[in-house]
Image (cartoon, rainbow, N blue to C red):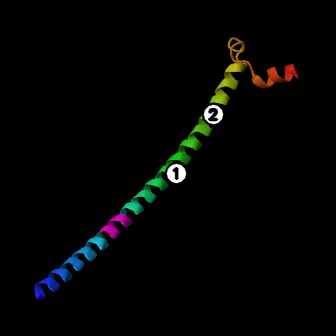
Amino acid sequence: MTTLVFSQILFYFSVSITVIILGLMMGVVVYRVIKIAKSLQQISENIEDASDDLGERLEDVLHNLSTLPILSFFFKNKKRGRAKSK
């Protein structure tokens, strides 16, 4: 009889320790997922800023190319083209 009580106590103790360890592991996993999500958000913001800067620089380059007489035929200024059509 005492061995059954002892085995039951040992079983409950081991199950509770296992549940505690699994809870801690899930907490660590959730923490890491949140950290990765924040990093991805920061990367996304950096890419958005870089693409905005790249767009502005490309507009400047196209504007500068459209001012050259030789290349002005290929790189027409869109603002002048729209103003003529209105």
Q: Please, what is the three-letter code of the amino acid marked with disc 1?
A: Gln
Nearest to the eye among marks 1 and 2: give it.
1
Residue denoted by label 2: 55
Numbered disc 1: secondary structure: helix
| Residue 81 at x, y percent in the picture | 80, 20
Report whether 21 appears left or right of 51: left
Q: Please, what is the three-letter code of the amino acid marked with disc 2?
A: Gly
What segment is highlighted magenta in the picture?
A: 22-27
Picture quarter with the C terminus: top right
Q: Any magenta on residue 25? A: yes
| Residue 3 at x, y percent in the picture | 11, 84
Report whether 82 appears left or right of 68: right
Using the image as rendered, state which of residue 39 and residue 65 is in the foreground: 39
Picture quarter with the N terminus: bottom left
Numbered disc 2: secondary structure: helix
Using the image as rendered, state which of residue 5 and residue 46 is in the foreground: 5
The residue sitting at 16% across, 85% down in the picture is: 5
Report whether 3 appears left or right of 62: left
The residue sitting at 54% across, 42% down in the picture is: 47
User: CA–CA distance between discs 1 and 2?
Assistant: 21 Å
| Residue 41 at x, y percent in the picture | 52, 51
Q: How crowded is mark 1: few (under 14 residues within 10 Å), some or many (20 or more)?
A: few
- Magenta-highlighted stretch: main secondary structure? helix
State yes or no: discs 1 and 2 in contact (Cβ < 8 Å).
no
Residue denoted by label 1: 41
